Image: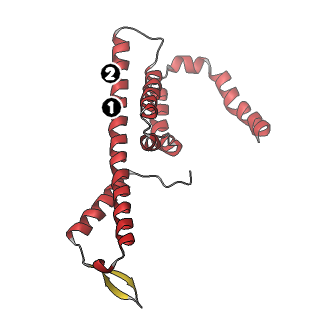
Amino acid sequence: GARARTTDAAWLSKLRDRTHGIVNAHPMRWLSAEEGLMDDEKMSKAEQEAKIAEGEAEDESIIMLKWATVVGIAALAGTFVIGFMLEQRHVHWLPEAAVGVLMGVLVAGIAKYFHESDLLEKEKFDFEFFMIWLLPPIIFEAGFNMNVQAFLANIHPTAFFAFVGTFASTFVVG
């Protein structure tokens, strides 16, 4: 959407900028050409508190992004483990993708129960990420593991729905 997306590069950049500011701290800040330089000591108390609050909010955002990453990786690991256990016990009625969805619902439910709205915001589904990074390997894997004989046996209905169905859908949907 229109919201700016926080990425790993963004929080690493913020962290790098903050540490650079600490190492190369300058006791004066630039205001404008007319006002010249002004000592930090002359800043009003409200400006100092606003600067501190802004830094704390940025730090909280970075920490929440890291927690969201850890929770996401833990949920993914849990999905793999549960999927492996189901495969070992020959439970074929529940695919691993469904285990992943259920794990996501569980993690979101726990975060909602503990009122972790920041975590829910960071773990929100990103359509663009899915379309660019996750969908192509899924399609590749499906094509790579496809039964070629079954595909060729059903080539006529497949071609019909691919071409005629798409043409009809263009006029029906718009």
Calculate the distance from the C-alpha at mark 1 to the C-alpha at mark 2. Answer: 10 Å
Image quadrant for the C terminus? Answer: top right
Q: Position of residue 3 (x, y in %)?
A: 53, 54
Q: Which residue is mark 2?
A: 81
Q: Is residue 138 above or below residue 87?
A: below
Q: Position of residue 132 (x, y in %)?
A: 49, 44
Q: Nearer the viewer, residue 22 or 144?
A: 22
For the point 42% across and 39% down, the residue is 116
- Is 146 left, or right, of 152 in this rendering? left
The residue lying furthest to the right in this view is: 171
Q: How is the image coloured?
A: secondary structure
Name the residue type under label 2.
Val
- Is 93 left, or right, of 78 in this rendering? right
Name the residue type under label 1.
Ala
Q: Position of residue 80 (x, y in %)?
A: 35, 24
Categorize mark 1 by other alpha carbons within 10 Å: few (<14), some (14-19), many (20+): some
Q: Nearer the viewer, residue 124 or 34?
A: 34
For the point 32% across and 38% down, the residue is 70
